[in-house]
Image (spheres, rainbow, N blue to C red):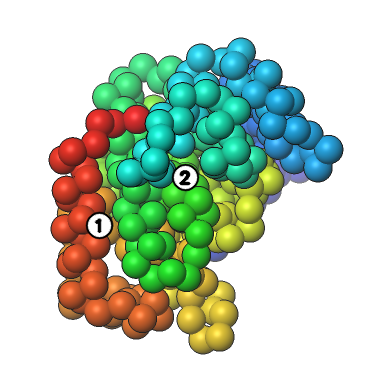
Amino acid sequence: MANTVKYFTPEETHRLKKEELRSRILEIIKISTIPSMMKKIMDVAEDPGSTVSDLEKLIEQDPAIASRVVAVSNAVFYGFSRKINSISQAILVLGFDMVKGLAVSTTVFNIRQPGFARELAALWGHSFECAMASILLARKTGLITKESAFLAGLLHDIGMPIMVQTCGVLYIESYKADEPCHKEEESFGASHAEAGAWFADKCKLPADCVMAIRHHHDPSACPKENNKAPVLVSITYLANIIARGEKPEADECFKEVLNDLGMSTDDFDSVSAEFAKIKAAAPSS
């Protein structure tokens, strides 16, 4: 009996790639590539009966997470009346969701991948800058808390190191070639934005943060709220642009987001200028 060969349409091939990638990403949190400390911190942060002391005891066991939590608590409250120098103070300032997000980002951005160390460091720097720009936009608009804005900004590109872990050298090559999101979808089944949203959702991060990660490149594709993109999605989109030093004035999505947030181009320019001053003055976390 002759063997039959099954041919897949381009749509079916894309769907299979996407399903395989999603499956691999959702399995990451169960395997050894994600340290047990991150899992423990997430469990404590999600437990309504947990206290600051419970979380502090865990965080102080991991120097990398501990130092980042304290450093970020000071950065978030730029100009705070007194310096935050203890983990317990930092947890109180940041809140459990933020600390959980920092545990996730610190762990994921600390992956050891040959040939990607320099890019990963630069990606973390950009993510932190996007988080700071998000805070400035949150203050300017008054539409969302700076903690929520910071978390979404910090994690907006979390899908990139996650895809490095799942796709290895193939993704590293595409990253270094600066391939756009649609090329990621063609090659791997999903963009880093969608992959990051899958991972963030699996980590039980806030739903609005997951949405911001998913649509930080294209708010117009996001489900609308009162005929507007959700505020956190719009702020993360603009923060990413500011952190990159861009101003796509002719872009319709850019104009629409400014309008949704009640901002003018002058407002955008003032936030960009404030960000540039802070970036020049503040040390990296």
Q: Residue at x 33, y 57 (%)?
A: 136
Q: Residue at x 51, y 86 (%)?
A: 227
Q: Secondary structure at mark 2?
A: helix
Crowding near the residue tagged with mark 1, few <14, some 14–19, many ≥20 C-alpha atoms within 10 Å: many
In the rendered image, residue 178, in percent from the top left (x then y), is placed at: 25, 45
In the rendered image, residue 11, in percent from the top left (x then y), is placed at: 54, 63
The residue pinned by badge 2 equals 155
Q: Residue furthest right?
A: 49
Using the rendered image of the protein, determine whether residue 186 is visible from the camera's viewpoint: no
Crowding near the residue tagged with mark 2, few <14, some 14–19, many ≥20 C-alpha atoms within 10 Å: many
In the rendered image, residue 158, in percent from the top left (x then y), is placed at: 47, 41
Rendered image: mark on residue 265: none
Q: Residue at x 47, y 70 (%)?
A: 143
Q: Nearer the viewer, residue 237 or 265?
A: 265
CA gap, disc 2 to disc 1? 16 Å
Q: Residue furthest front?
A: 81
The residue pinned by badge 1 equals 242
Q: Nearer the viewer, residue 149 or 56?
A: 56
Using the rendered image of the protein, determine whether residue 145 is visible from the camera's viewpoint: yes
Vertical side of 45 occupied by 246: above or below: below
Q: Residue at x 24, y 36 (%)?
A: 282
Vertical side of 71 occupied by 211: above or below: below
Quadrant into which the N terminus falls: top right
